[in-house]
Amino acid sequence: MTAVFPTVREVLALDPVRHGEPRVVAGESGLGRRVRWVHVAEVPDIATLLNGGELVLTTGIGLPADDAGLRTFVDALADVDASGLVVELGRRYPAAVPRSMVAAAHRRGLPLVELRRATPFVPITEAVHGLIVDAQLSELRATEEIHQRFTELSVEGAEPAEVVRQAAELSGCPVVLENLARQVLAYHPAGQSAGPLLDGWERHSRRIRPAGRTAYDPDAGWLVTTVGARGQDWGRLLLRWPPTAEQAADHPDVPPQPPSRLTILLERAASTLALGRLIRRDAEGLERQIHRNLLTALLDHGRPVDEVALRARALGVPLERRRLVGVVVRHRADEPGAELAAEAAQARLHDLAEEVGRAVREAGLTGLASAVDDQAVGALLALAPDATDDAALSEFAAALERVRAAGPGWPGGGPPVVVAAGSTVTSVREARRSLVEARQVADAARRGRRDLPVFRLATVGLAGLLHLLRDDPRIQTFVERELGALLAHQAEHPREQLFDTLRAYLEHGRNKSAAASAAHLSRPAFYERLTRIGRILDTDLDSVPACLSLHVALLALDAIHDTT
């Protein structure tokens, strides 16, 4: 029952009840039960009129005279989940309630309270009902504050860390945002230590299994909702309830289920996060902004291709009857200072977009150039019919190096960048494919070798491709489908090194003898582990297609765990 309603213990602390000198004679462990309503009754079959959560007040004058009847009365109240029974002494029971009633209440865990002093019931019902109404109004005010707060965050385009912080502050509970690979994207400990909260998070998260899109897992103690929009889920938002194990132990009135207010809060926070992911803000100059609109239209199918070509021609960038090459330029990820504050990162990206635009002009090329996301600058080069793409790309890369070297504020050209190009296409309708390919190559090539002025698809392998796709929910879903059972088993049995066994087996081309030697295990022990892995994954490790899928999933898992 929701925490809006007071507990039996709180009702007993009210002045009109204290006036009656209450004494708990049975069911003390149930004093944390919530009281939904107070019902005055002097008939033995009152249970048929109750819906659960009622605190029954009686003088006992209409109760059965025999012990069996009293036991039946108490059992009936317990069966309909009444919150408790309060009996005023004096009229029917002069000094104490019958022992049979006490024994029955004790057996059913039903709070049984004696009022040792004559007490009018009306002030009690007024006080409790007033408490309930006040609590409901407070809940409504809190819900209104939640909606107002997260509406403001949505309008402001708040960062995920700020949304999570607000959720934690409003709830008073630790909140964690994770992706589909169970990696923490943002968190707020709500005044607690972050170490115990995040230590071994992936293993702990896999044990949290809510029953629905938004649900509470009582075994794990987390309220969970899925984060996503337009049918594309990309993470989970989790709120711990109770906030600490100590609170649950020290405060028996803490309800076992989180209040409905927290469910509303978590879902509103998730909606704000999903909306924020869809919003892209930029502060480019007019020319760069128009270029970005056209490139975005090609990438997102936001406008008809013919309209994009028409508007580009009006800008002096003819795309028809040209050979088109998509290019993406981005900073390397392994350089000092690669991780910057949001404002600094946006400023650096803006500078890079301007440098790319100048390099296109200096190389004697025509094309569209602008930032295409928060980390990369894209260009669609329109090559003359007699130009070769390799020569044009080399000229562009050289021009970009000159422009960056001469640019203000970055002596020597600033942090190194990766220049990546997609396949050459012959129509505007195919331009998106070249741009997407260039972005993928740039993401994969920003680590490792530096000896190429321009990277193409042929220079990056499967591992690089999976690395650039590691945040794609489809890749994460694939990894979960292929390896989820083994990941869950590893979370439950962290000392077993089954992943090392599987990796050795796949990397040695399913050669069990060589894999056992590389894993420093005897063949029988190695074979036994493989059998266990096959049983956990419910797959045939002698099957080439099955092992191929597992190997790709393992490489993808490595890419997901590579956060450098």
Image (cartoon, rainbow, N blue to C red):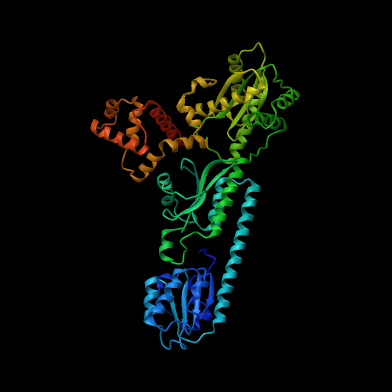
List x then y, in percent, for residue 194.
45, 51
List x then y, in percent, for residue 512.
29, 27
List x then y, in percent, for residue 517.
26, 28
In the picture, measured across the screen, residue 522 lies left or right of residue 29, that is left
Task: Using the image as rendered, state which of residue 438 and residue 189 is in the foreground.
Answer: 438
Q: Is residue 149 above or below residue 509?
A: below
Q: Residue at x 59, y 65 (%)?
A: 138
List x then y, in percent, for residue 496.
31, 40
In the picture, measured across the screen, residue 410 lies left or right of residue 18, that is right
Task: Using the image as rendered, state which of residue 407 and residue 183 is in the foreground.
Answer: 183
Outermost residue, top side: 386
Q: Residue at x 37, y 34 (%)?
A: 539
Q: How many marks?
A: 0
Task: Using the image as rendered, state which of residue 403 and residue 114 is in the foreground.
Answer: 114
Q: Is residue 556 visible?
A: yes
Quarter of the view holding residue 369: top right
Q: Is residue 3 above or below residue 43?
A: above
Q: Is residue 416 visible?
A: no
Q: Residue at x 62, y 40 (%)?
A: 278
